[in-house]
Amino acid sequence: PEICRFAVQARNPLLVEKPLATTVTDARTMVALAHDAGLPFMTAQTLRFDRTIQHMKRFQSSLGRSLKLDTVFQIEIRKTAPDHVAGYGKRGALLEIGVHMLDLARFLTGEEVQAVRCTMDHIPPIAPERMASVHLTMTGGTICRMEITRVVSERAGRAIRVGSQGRVEADWMRRRICTETSSGEKTADIDIPPSLTVLDTLSAFLQAVHDGTPMPITGEDGCRAVEIAEACYQSAQLGGALVTLPVAG
């Protein structure tokens, strides 16, 4: 928030890495600062620019009524600086990497999150979580289930989107997509070209600043992901109880 405040005072457009903040209060403060100053503000939810994810979203209209979204996201355990966890408010995998999945739920379905249930292997701030199981209820009725884990093996990123007229499966680590209609007709796996998500994020930000057009991923989008994460932590602290949004800051 302090860096954001200085940028606003200098009248600079803002591009902020995910997660936008470690608390709902900070996220809302940052969005309000930019909004009140009339400055462009983008959140770098880079996975939205992954070509496999974008290809998957193109199937949205052909799937019929949205029913279910299942995602798995695994990132390797790695050595970090001693103060790394403190920088994330003593939180772990959900806020660090799972925030991508929380944002994708909104991006892929076009719906808002209404309520969450979440369990974790550790409850911050006692210890940062390495595993989180998340269940989201969306405003349009889509059920989203997410498994977010730090693992000793290789990375994995998969999503299955199910609608009344078919389903689409995507693996953005292996850059492959396959579809199946409600009648059982399947397509062969589609190979997707490699993505340069950081470059594409920067390019989209600069293009929007240059053209004076809306940011493709807003500060509000980043704030919403932090709000969903906060609800997940509250649910985990309550033993997986249902928590409705919005949460108090």
Image: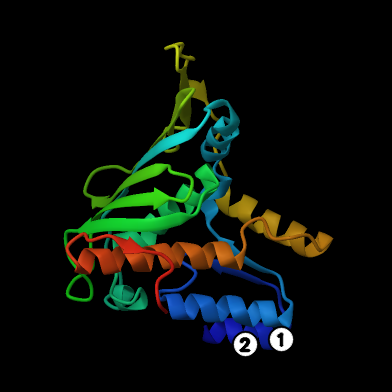
**In this picture, is 125 found above or below 163?**
below
Dot 1: within a 10 Å radius of its alpha carbon, few (fewer than 14), some, or many (20 or more) residues?
few
Label 1 secondary element: loop
Contact flag, marks 2 and 1 (Cβ < 8 Å): yes
* Quadrant of the rendered image containing residue 102: bottom left
70 on left or right of 64: left
Dot 2: within a 10 Å radius of its alpha carbon, few (fewer than 14), some, or many (20 or more) residues?
few
* Quadrant of the rendered image containing residue 23: bottom left
Question: Residue under circle 2?
Answer: 6
Question: Residue under circle 1?
Answer: 10
Q: Amino acid at mark 1?
A: Ala
Looking at the image, which residue is at 21% across and 57% down? 119
Label 2 secondary element: helix
Q: Amino acid at mark 2?
A: Phe
Tell me residue 56's x, y (percent).
Answer: 53, 34
Tell me residue 97's x, y (percent).
Answer: 38, 57
**In this picture, is 203 found above or below 167?**
below
